[in-house]
Amino acid sequence: MNQIEDALSTFNSGVYVVSAKRGQEINGLTCTWVMRVSLDPVLVAVSVGKTRYTYDLIKEGGAFAVSVLADGQEDIGRFFGSASGRDTDKFAFYPHEAKATGAPILSGCAAWLDCKLLHSYDAGDHTLFVGEVVDAGVSGSPALIFKSSDFA
Ligand SMILES: Cc1cc2nc3c(=O)[nH]c(=O)nc-3n(C[C@H](O)[C@H](O)[C@H](O)COP(=O)(O)O)c2cc1C
């Protein structure tokens, strides 16, 4: 690793499954590049690679949900971060439910946010999707902290 990658690897983050719905189709991907970006209104941003299948669903569906993975959900992070919705129905393997926007939310997660897409910003090979939080919930389980060794 070079110095830039070494420096960036010191950032701490949670592990999130960002999901969306387009028509009857649902999908999601593991993301660590997720952050709050406004107090009022409450806005969150997720950085999604342009080649990801979920990218198209967020753009065309106009909404996304964020499931904050809980301690012990490393397997979900690994699965949603390696398989693609192009050839795998990832949500068929894990219980989930839909709230206001219809984007799927994983059962047993530490917390969830349901977001209406407000803005999309081009960011290199990713796009920063900014959403207004329209509903949310917390379970009381501690959130999973990202460690690259868990996902090697
Ligand atoms: C720990 C971890 C973190 C990841 N973080 C991101 C991220 O922040 N943004 C992103 O676009 N992809 C990220 N990925 C890669 C996607 O989750 C992966 O390419 C996924 O298979 C795409 O699924 P899709 O094609 O169904 O959308 C991450 C993967 C892992 C394992």
Image: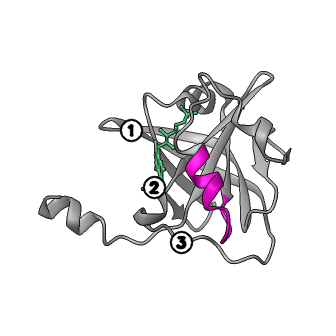
Look at the numbered disc 2 and say if its residue's Cβ is closer than 8 Å to ligand 1. yes
Q: CA distance from mark 1 to mark 3?
A: 22 Å
Quarter of the image with the C terminus in it? bottom left
Q: CA distance from mark 2 to mark 1?
A: 10 Å
> How crowded is the residue under tag 2: few (<14 C-alpha within 10 Å), some, or many (20+)?
some
Name the residue at the left extreme.
Answer: 3
- Amino acid on which the number 1 mark rests in the picture: His
Marks 2,1: beta carbons within 8 A = yes
Q: Which quadrant of the figure has residue 25?
A: top right
Write down the region rendered in magenta: 68-79
Q: Is residue 45 magenta?
A: no
> How crowded is the residue under tag 1: few (<14 C-alpha within 10 Å), some, or many (20+)?
some
Q: CA distance from mark 3 to mark 2?
A: 13 Å
Counting residues from the N terminus, which is met first, the one under dot 1 or under dot 3? 1
Q: Going 82% across and 56% down the picture, which residue do you hit?
A: 107
Residue assigned mark 3: 145
Look at the numbered disc 1 and say if its residue's Cβ is closer than 8 Å to ligand 1. yes
Residue assigned mark 1: 126
Residue 22 on image: x %, y %: 71, 25
Marks 3,2: beta carbons within 8 A = no
Q: Going 48% across and 37% down the picture, which residue do you hit?
A: 120
- Amino acid on which the number 3 mark rests in the picture: Ile
Residue assigned mark 2: 33
Residue 146 on image: x %, y %: 49, 67
- Pair 1/3: label in front: 3
